[in-house]
Image: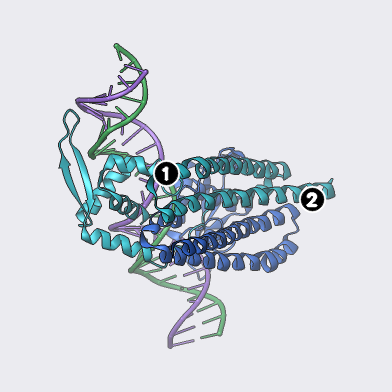
Chain colours: A cyan, B blue, C green, D purple
DNA sequence: AAGACCATGTAACTCGTTACATGATTTG
DNA sequence: CAAATCATGTAACGAGTTACATGGTCTT
């Protein structure tokens, strides 16, 4: 149920077209939530049907007509409700890497080590990407919007990702060390 | 694409019925991957159609007939391929909590603090749950199976979860401290 | 003139969830 | 005797992905 609310959130910043929403989801919001245009237009229809947003056709000179969506009263109530709702639905219970790890012991120590090493280097790459955002992108945006709390939330969202990646890297290192010890024991 | 492979993996440990698979997914595998019976029976049909597993009817006295599924050659090849394949599809790019955080600054400092605190206590609970598994459940199982590498992989899968939760808790504490400082500045 | 970007979608599919149906058998 | 467990599903929906179609404009 989060895409609907992501759209409501973006539209409450300012009314915009489906295309603009798609850009937002695949740039600013990319690290929290992404969406394809096909899905966005489908959800926009649903949100209009529900009476949460309204659509306005805007003629453009030259370009084809644009449909600008704006939040309505009911929609903004629903968005507020979602913002404040307690239950952070219990995610994390589906991890393809851990599923693989569970079975991987059957393929031998080398396979385990390789998989863990690969996971660690993916985490390195991810952390590096997010550090660029924290150090370069956020300060630039923060300076231009001037909302201290908002800037902090965006920065902390990226920091959250970095913290997760770093924990992954430390875990991988400890695991590899223990595998080394095990191998020593076995031969 | 992981449920199919999870099923192949379990069936390669020993042939079993859909019901047994469901139990496995919702006990041993719960923290990596879960699945409802409705989904499992659907996937079993698909796997049979693909020629990766075969079905055998087993008459039981009293009870209704059971269908036992077993991996076939093609299926075990496919499972091996999956075990070794490089690409760990880059997940993590959908986090309802971070999406909420992104918009939450608009609802004020109190709302942000509450959400972060709630996230931290969920993480505490999750970590506690996994620590029980590491300390009590895994040693018991490890003693009975006697496969050192497998036991280590299961333990490390749980440790991975603990590491993630702990990183979340540290992140939340740091964030709350910074919010405190911000509040001091503002008023 | 070619290619990127604007703008809006459709179609078909996969994967996951919720709720329910059936009917037996073992356990408290 | 009631409840949990065994065993197998169906139906309908919700959410996300891939691939493609169309036709314009702006940029190099």
Which residue, given by chain and number where applicable, does mark 2 sit on?
A182
Residue sitting nearer the eye, D5 or D22: D22
Location of residue A114 with respect to A181 vertically, above or below? above
Q: Please, what secondary structure does the residue beneath circle 1 have?
A: helix
Residue B16 percent location from the top left of the image: 56, 57
Residue A73 percent location from the top left of the image: 21, 60
Location of residue C26 with respect to C10 vertically, above or below? below
The chain letter for the residue carrying disc 1 is A
Residue sitting nearer the eye, A45 or B112: B112
Distance from Cα at disc 1 to Cα at disc 2: 49 Å
Among the 4 quarters of the image, the one containing residue A79: bottom left
Image quarter of the N terminus of chain A: bottom left
Mark with earlier residue (1, 2)? 1
Asked whether residue A23 appears in the rendered view, the answer is yes
Relative to A76, A59 lies left or right: left
- Asked if the residue under mark 2 is in contact with the one under mark 1, i.e. CB atoms within 8 Å, the reply is no
Relative to B177, B102 lies left or right: left
Which residue, given by chain and number where applicable, does mark 1 sit on?
A141
**What residue do we see at 45% from left, 57% from top?**
B97
Asked whether residue B9 appears in the rendered view, the answer is no
The chain letter for the residue carrying disc 2 is A
Image quarter of the C terminus of chain A: top right
Residue sitting nearer the eye, A42 or B102: B102
Residue B136 percent location from the top left of the image: 69, 69
**What residue do we see at 46% from left, 65% from top?**
B113
């Amino acid at each position: 149920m989060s895409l609907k609310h992501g759209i409501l959130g973006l539209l409450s910043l300012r009314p915009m077209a489906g295309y603009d929403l798609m850009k937002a989801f695949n740039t600013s919001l990319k690290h929290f939530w992404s969406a394809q245009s096909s899905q966005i237009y489908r959800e926009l229809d649903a949100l209009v049907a529900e009476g949460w947003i309204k659509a306005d056709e805007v003629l453009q000179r030259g370009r084809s007509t644009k449909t600008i969506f704006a939040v309505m009263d009911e929609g903004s109530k629903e968005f507020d409700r979602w913002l404040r709702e307690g239950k952070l639905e219990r995610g994390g219970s589906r991890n393809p890497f851990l599923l693989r790890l569970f079975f991987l012991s059957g393929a031998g120590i080398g396979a385990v080590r390789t998989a863990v090493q690969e996971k660690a280097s993916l985490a390195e790459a991810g952390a590096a990407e997010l550090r660029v955002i924290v150090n370069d992108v956020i300060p630039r945006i923060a300076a231009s919007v001037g909302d201290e709390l908002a800037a902090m939330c965006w920065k902390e969202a990226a920091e959250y990702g970095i913290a997760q990646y770093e924990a992954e890297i430390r875990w991988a290192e400890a695991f590899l060390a223990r595998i080394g010890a095990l191998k020593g024991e076995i031969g």
